Image: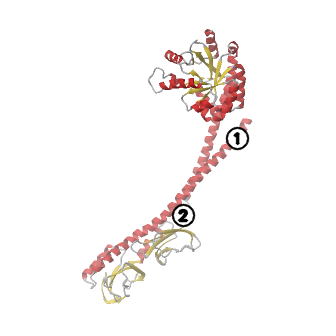
Amino acid sequence: MRQRVSAWTSRTKNIVVSWLICSFLFGLLTTFIYIQHTESEKADVRSMAQRVLIDFGSQLDSVDTFLRQSDSIDVTCSDTTIRRMRQFVFKHPAISEIGIVTPKGELVCNSFGVLAPPMFIEEPPKKRGLRYHGPIISEFLQVSAFVLARTRHDGYEINALLPTDWINDLLHLSKYSELDYIAIVDSGSGVPIFLQGRYSLPLGHSLFPSSQSSAFEGEFDDKSRKFMYIQPFKNVPQLSVIVSKSTRRIFTPSPIWLVVLCLMYVISWVGLVLLLNYYDQRLLSSRVLLLSAINRDELFNVYQPLVDAHSQNIVGAEVLIRWMHPLEGELGPAYFVPEAERDGTILEMSLYQIDRAISDLRPILVANSNFKVSFNVNGFLLGCPSYIKKLCEAKEVFPRLTIELTERDMLSQAKIKSVLHQLVDLGVEIAIDDFGTGYCGLQYLQSFPIDLLKIDQSFVASIGLDNLQSPVLNAVIEMAEKLGKKLIAEGVETELQAKYLKVRGVSVHQGWYYFKALRIDAFKNQLALGE
């Protein structure tokens, strides 16, 4: 019943945690998409204005180029002049007519021919440069047209007429996605000259006269919020193009994207819940298996002898654990200890190991009270009161009790310093396992109550070889001697290694040169042979 409640609580926790994680991540993703969508829509509005500037501006450029060359036009309306004007109209379908106006305001001829009598329009202004006026009704064609004109140095005006139908077709809203309006306006007053859509301007914000491109987002006089972009034409700065789009359309993503995002959110949420449930189930399964193995006494100790190199006698043992798996057979610690550390079963396993060691080694201690017994310990175990209590019980049975920590535990668990001092006060010896492979500096050796250094087997293996680790071994031995630390050599596998270490004062060895890790019966037999 308790297990079911625990499983239900774990699943509920996974659902809530997954929801929080997915909500946070998708919140960030939604914000990013929203900003990107908004900026993309605004850029799209600007690009629509650029299309008009390019399409209409290209016609303005062509007309302006032609009108700039008007000083070479024969104002007597010769056949050459008429032909030249007709050729330009023919090459530019957007131009319907070109005319010549005298300083007195009389249209004397156009691209269709000489007017007889001349038609009075209005006196050309003396101001030089390209200008516009209109739209007007062309007296000759009787159609609405937009006029571009230049006054020559002699007072004559050359003008070109662009049909308003062509301009309105250029600006037709069907060509521009979801715009509120698009217009060509007077840059000084903002009065629309050509308009498609419902024209409106920002409230409380003066845009005109306008001499450069600008953008505005806010409340408009039609009581709606819009984003607007305005930019003058390059060659005719008196004219500007304005495009406007409702912010509601800008800020609302496509429904397809919303559906996709919601589906991704739900799928991610469900997937994360399943993943966390699987992880919990695996941890629970691993924990149940290991606890069951402990209850069925499938875990057992083996003992790695510590040998005095001078007398060749066994003076102690490092206690190691193995698992006699019902299907896999005998498993070394690499197969289950890391899993036990992850799911917390390492505590129950270590308590079981000490109890088994007490049971196995008690007869040996009766005959040899000076026998050294060593256990591997990590920082997590030293933070568990139940394990410290068990070590105290073991100390009563093993007078020469040693615990071995790795250098990584020493560095990452500085808070265990007080615990180590308590153990030292009880007479427990503290050793650093695999010394030289981690990051333990001199300050740690001096500030922590370290009694013993175990030389890592990689340094022992370098004996007799010319490699980078060879000098390190000698340095470790010299440092230990100067600091008054005892040494044990791990991984001694050859006679050369044993002699080399013995000559340099390292007298306690362990390794396959002497013995492999032994079960308790074999271990007792070896002790008996040594006697």
Element type at mark 1: helix
Give amino acid for label 1: Trp
Q: Residue drawn at (51%, 22%), measured in percent from left and top? A: 460
Q: Which residue is mark 2?
A: 250
Classify 10 Å Cα crowding around label 1: few (below 14), some (14-19), many (20 and above). few
Asked whether the viewer can see residue 146, the reply is: no
Give coordinates of residue 346: x percent, y percent.
65, 30
Question: 343 or 358, which is in the foreground?
Answer: 358
Give amino acid for label 2: Ile
Image vertical order of residue 106 relative to residue 215, above or below = below
Answer with the quarter of the image where residue 322 lies.
top right
Asked whether the viewer can see residue 165, the reply is: yes
Question: 497 or 281, which is in the foreground?
Answer: 497
As drawn, the residue found furthest toward the bottom would be 117
Q: Which residue is mark 1?
A: 8
Which circle marks residue 55 in the picture? none
Give coordinates of residue 125: x percent, y percent.
38, 85
**What colour scheme does the image use?**
secondary structure
Alpha carbon distance from label 2 to label 1:
45 Å
> Which of marks 1 and 2 precedes in the sequence?
1
Give coordinates of residue 59: x percent, y percent.
37, 72
- Is disc 2 in contact with disc 1, using a CB cutoff of under 8 Å? no
Give coordinates of residue 261: x percent, y percent.
57, 53
Answer with the quarter of the image where residue 380 lies.
top right
Q: Residue drawn at (64%, 36%), measured in percent from left and top? A: 281
Q: Quadrant of the N terminus?
A: top right
Q: Quadrant of the C terminus?
A: top right
